Amino acid sequence: MTINYKWTALSNTTIGTLMASLDTNIIIIALPTIVSDIHVSLLTLVWILLGYSLVTASILLNLGRLSDMLGRVKLYNIGFIIFTIGSALCSLSQTGEQLLLFRIVQSLGAAFLFSNSAAIITDAFPENERGEALGINQISIVVGSVMGLIFGGFLTSYLGWRSIFWINIPIGVFATIWSHTKLRELGTIKKEQIDWIGNATLAVGLSLILIGITFGSFQILNSIPFGMYLFVIVGLSLIGLFVFVERSVIKPMIDLSLFRIRSFLGGNIAIFFNAIARGAFILIMTFYLQGPTMKLSPLDAGIYLLPVSIALSIFGPFSGWISDRYGSRVISSIGLFISAIGFFMLTSLGTKSTFIETLLPLAMIGAGMGIFASPNRASIMNSVPRYQRGVAAGTSTMFVLSGSTLSVGLAFLIMSHTMPLGYIESIFLGTTEITTKDSIKSNNNSNNNNNTNNQNQVQNGNNNNVKITMTLLHSTTIINNFLSSLHYVFLLSAMLMLISILPVCISAGNKCDNHNIKNN
């Protein structure tokens, strides 16, 4: 293996994960424009927002197993092609339903990229350099999520919402050709029978759980008796069936004995709780910054979130380098604790916050994410034998995306218990500001049309003043309820960050993993 190849593998896979993660959040900034342009309903909007992560999380583990059997580089290249085609189709969407369908196509490509990037890097780098390499790659996932807001704001403001998908096309074509010509298979390819029953039970079970919790929080399943609970119970039953199937078949999709490895089990539990803690963070902050509370432009909202990306970019690779030399347990725990402090600080957000006031908590959250992600991922990947790294990478990323999707559901579940659904729709669709402007416009038109009748003018003026006062009062009530919900969401995030420290502490460090030494 040449020295140049490992950096080629890292560069290409980082572009892949950056593109896939960028499109997780880049659409959030453009949502108001999309709603007004192609008249998307709230239900369709929810699917567009969450369907990307839901589909990706549902099939990641299956693809990880398939990559171990068919070749990681081969499936990775297929992922680039699918993702690029999906991006082109999204830019041509004329209805919300079309955009939803093409986002699902895009998410399939993202799943191929996510499930194979870490395994390709692990194969290319020696053990004492994997932490730093995986750190750079994994940081690109979170940086992509945050940078998506900035690029999305800029592109939407100046080129329209379709441009957020145009940007993927030339990059995708270049990266596809590059990966096809330069990347090569280094892992062991094992020709085995595909576990179709295990694939189906896991994918459907996970989808039902995520749909039940997420859509139940939006009260979309109210027409179905015990809708949310029914979906979750059936989903959990299928997960239980999956475990039974994997214990019964000769060639299971995933070797459940991997979860007996403390680094693998503890690392994935920690990454799952961490994803729940931070998954809705960008979405909620976007509503706070762009909505009726702060009323910032898409570009300004992205700038407010820059400290997260900058801190994460600085501390992520550095923590990976440190963990390669001193182990992952203490480093990961410090990162989680720092993020918890940042979330605690966000519970004091008010109706108007300056950039300076949000700088420190956002920077601490970003720094904590970076310090945690690299060592934890390296510990997971180093703990498994080479021929199972595709499954290990897919499992880890599945926990991240599942936790992130669940996080959004929990955030809106908290909101639905602290404010009416109509208020949530007002924040989500930005209707409070429009209503206020319409009332003021109505007041001006009324005064102009009644100049000939002083009595009617005074009466109509008074009525419209009452309307404006009621609208402003309604807007203030919505904002106060929203802030209260935000504080509860961030408090929960802080608590989950602290809870994530426990599985990190009880798992073995990557320097002491006998399983890794034996099998690697």
Image: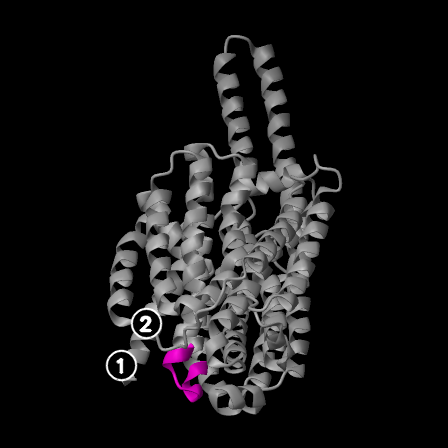
Residue 128 on the magenta segment? yes
Q: Which residue is mark 1?
A: 4
Q: How is the image coloured?
A: one colour
Q: Position of residue 178 (x, y in %)?
A: 25, 66
Does the rendering let one see residue 177? yes
| Residues at circles 1 and 2 in contact by the CB criterion of under 8 Å | no
Q: State the separation of the CA atoms marked 1 and 2.
A: 11 Å
> Please, is residue 36 above or below residue 453 in the view?
below
Magenta span main SS? helix
Q: Secondary structure at mark 2?
A: helix
Q: Secondary structure at mark 1?
A: helix
The part of the chain drawn in magenta is 122-131
> Please, is residue 273 above or below residue 167 in the view?
below
Q: Nearer the viewer, residue 316 or 83?
A: 83
> Please, is residue 75 above or below residue 368 in the view?
above
Please tell me in which quadrant of the rendered image residue 467 appears: top right
Q: Which residue is mark 2?
A: 11
Q: Nearer the viewer, residue 501 or 283?
A: 501
Disc marking residue 224: none
Given the image, on which type of amino acid does mark 1 rest? Asn
Q: Nearer the viewer, residue 472 or 161?
A: 161
Dot 1 alpha-carbon crowd within 10 angstroms: few under 14, some 14 to 19, many 20 or more: few
Residue 102 on the magenta segment? no
Q: Position of residue 483 (x, y in %)?
A: 64, 51
Residue at image x 59%, y 30%? 468
